[in-house]
């Protein structure tokens, strides 16, 4: 893990060097690269006025203020971490116990995962289980397949009795069939 972090640190150092703003006497290659996007020169209208860059002095002072604030916050975070975890390592545990429920709430990430599970995941699981799986898959699809198989089995059980091996029975079935065919032809008018 050290090698990827070293590569990222080197790339951030190079990126910071390439993007040094004009207010810190740098070349600001990023601003030059992105100027066609952010510094539009379209004619007329409020959009053109909003897209025009501020005056050089205003831009430099604003950039210096925001750069100073971000460096100060980073330095404050570094000093606070050094004080809490190197200088006084027992202090974080005391602060956590003093914060009580607030510390537990932050540690549990404001219980967003539990809320997400209760509001979205559990209803989706219930819908999938009761409607899609039990209702549609087992009830409708499997029911149609199983119902077709049961109907075929009942029909075969009923027709199986015609195959008794008794020749008199077969002759009787042939007579019944011939009678049915003759009755149908008479009914249709002997066409």
Image (spheres, grey):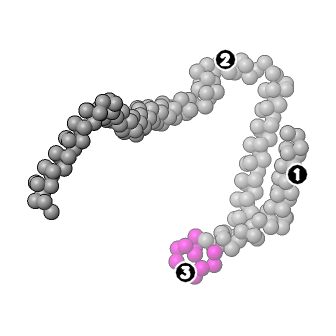
**Under tag 3, what secondary structure?**
loop
**Which residue is most to the front?**
167
- In the picture provided, is 156 more to the left or to the right than 95? left
- In the picture provided, is 149 more to the left or to the right than 171? right
**Foreground residue among 122 and 168:** 168
Mark number displayed over residue 10: 1
> Mark 2 and 3 residues: CB-CB less than 8 Å, in contact?
no
Residue 43 lies in the magenta-colored region: yes
Q: Residue at x 55, y 33 (%)?
A: 112
Place of residue 29 in the rendered image (x, y in percent of width and height, measured from the top left): 80, 67
Residue 64 lies in the magenta-colored region: no
Image quadrant holding the C terminus, namely: bottom left
* Of callouts 2 and 3, the N-terminal one: 3
Residue 17 sits in quarter: bottom right
**Mark 1–mark 3 distance (CA, rounded to whole Å):** 44 Å
Q: Residue at x 80, y 61 (%)?
A: 19
Mark number displayed over residue 44: 3
Span colored in magenta: 40-50
Place of residue 98 in the rendered image (x, y in percent of width and height, measured from the top left): 65, 18
**Which residue is most to the bottom?**
43
> Which residue is identified by label 2?
97
> Mark 2 and 1 residues: CB-CB less than 8 Å, in contact?
no
**Under tag 1, what secondary structure?**
helix
**Foreground residue among 149 and 66:** 149
User: Is 44 rendered above or below residue 28?
Assistant: below
**Foreground residue among 1 and 167:** 167
Disc 1 vs disc 3: which is toward the camera? 1
Residue 162 sits in quarter: top left
């Amino acid at each position: 893990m050290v090698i990827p972090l070293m590569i990222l640190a080197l790339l951030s150092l190079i990126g910071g060097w390439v993007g040094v703003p004009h207010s810190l006497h740098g070349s600001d290659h990023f601003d030059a690269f992105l100027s066609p996007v952010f510094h539009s020169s379209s004619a007329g209208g409020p959009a053109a006025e909003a897209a025009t860059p501020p005056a050089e002095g205003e831009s430099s002072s604003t950039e210096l203020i925001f750069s100073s604030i971000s460096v100060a916050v980073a330095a404050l975070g570094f000093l606070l971490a050094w004080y809490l975890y190197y200088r006084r390592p027992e202090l974080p545990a005391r602060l956590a116990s003093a914060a009580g429920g607030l510390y537990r709430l932050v540690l549990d990430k404001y219980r967003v995962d539990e809320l997400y599970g209760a509001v979205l995941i559990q209803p989706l699981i219930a819908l999938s289980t009761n409607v899609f799986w039990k209702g549609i898959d087992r009830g409708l699809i499997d029911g149609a397949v199983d119902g077709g198989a049961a109907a075929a089995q009942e029909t075969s059980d009923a027709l199986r009795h015609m195959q008794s091996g008794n020749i008199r029975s077969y002759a009787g079935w042939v007579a019944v069939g011939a009678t049915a065919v003759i009755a149908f032809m008479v009914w249709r008018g002997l066409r």
